[in-house]
Image: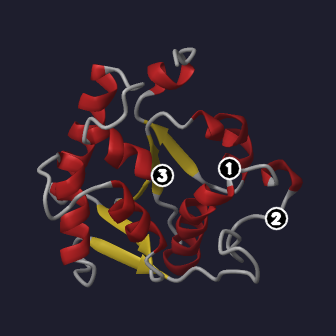
Amino acid sequence: MNTVVVDTNVVVIANGAAPHASLDCIERCQNRLEQILSRPEKVVIDDGWRILGEYDDNTKPNTRKGIGDLFVKTLMQNQGNPNICKIVHITPLAGNGTDFEEFPTDDALCGFDPDDRKFIAVALAHQQDIGETPTILLAIDRGWLEFMSALASHGVNVDLICEEDIQRPRQD
């Protein structure tokens, strides 16, 4: 079974809403979401609407017509369809809602962005449930780069869709 967890930046960039993304990166994100929508892969999300809620906050699935919007609308309409979505439970720890039991506690990941921990927790929860770790799709979030080895040590595979963009110095 092919499964993916999609970071929100892929969805936003596919809509062309990230001015710092190259045209090539935008096209790569659009193509990747179109590929997912053609059903060769299932999207893994959490049962607490953390991922879908973040997607919804960053898109307009009911009014705009970008591929990112279509992707989000499709997931929202098909949450219960096991051919499209796999929903896993992640266990929030007491506190701010960004720490999860499924997120590794080793020192190498202590500085990982708390807002992105849900994606790792979902991937590892799926691994616990099914025995397979979905690939996390990432576009240009440079904050992940220093943690790639630590994530890999936990079996987390990250696909850098826009590797050239993420390696290029940012021009703000």
Q: Which residue is mark 2?
A: 105
Would you identify the image quadrant in which residue 56 lies?
A: bottom left
Q: x and y percent of residue 6 in the render?
A: 40, 54
Amino acid type of the residue tagged 2 in the rendering: Thr
Which residue is located at x 71 percent, y 70 percent?
99
Q: Which element is circle 3 on?
A: strand
Q: Which residue is mark 1?
A: 151
Identify the image quadrant of the N terminus.
bottom left
Left-right relation of 114 to 60? right
Q: Mark 1 near mark 3, Cβ–Cβ under 8 Å?
A: no
Seen in the picture, residue 98 relative to 49 is either above or below; the reply is above
Q: Earlier in the sequence, mark 1 or mark 3?
A: 3
Seen in the picture, residue 109 relative to 165 is either above or below; the reply is below
Q: x and y percent of residue 163 in the render?
A: 47, 26
Amino acid type of the residue tagged 1 in the rendering: Leu
- Using the image as rendered, state which of residue 48 and residue 124 is in the foreground: 48
Amino acid type of the residue tagged 3 in the rendering: Ile
Q: What's the CA distance linking mark 1 and mark 2? A: 11 Å
Q: Earlier in the sequence, mark 1 or mark 2?
A: 2
Q: Which residue is mark 3?
A: 136
Q: What's the CA distance linking mark 1 and mark 3? A: 11 Å
Q: x and y percent of residue 132 in the render?
A: 50, 66
- Using the image as rendered, state which of residue 98 and residue 29 is in the foreground: 98
Q: Earlier in the sequence, mark 2 or mark 3?
A: 2
What's the image's color scheme?
secondary structure
Q: Mark 2 near mark 3, Cβ–Cβ under 8 Å?
A: no
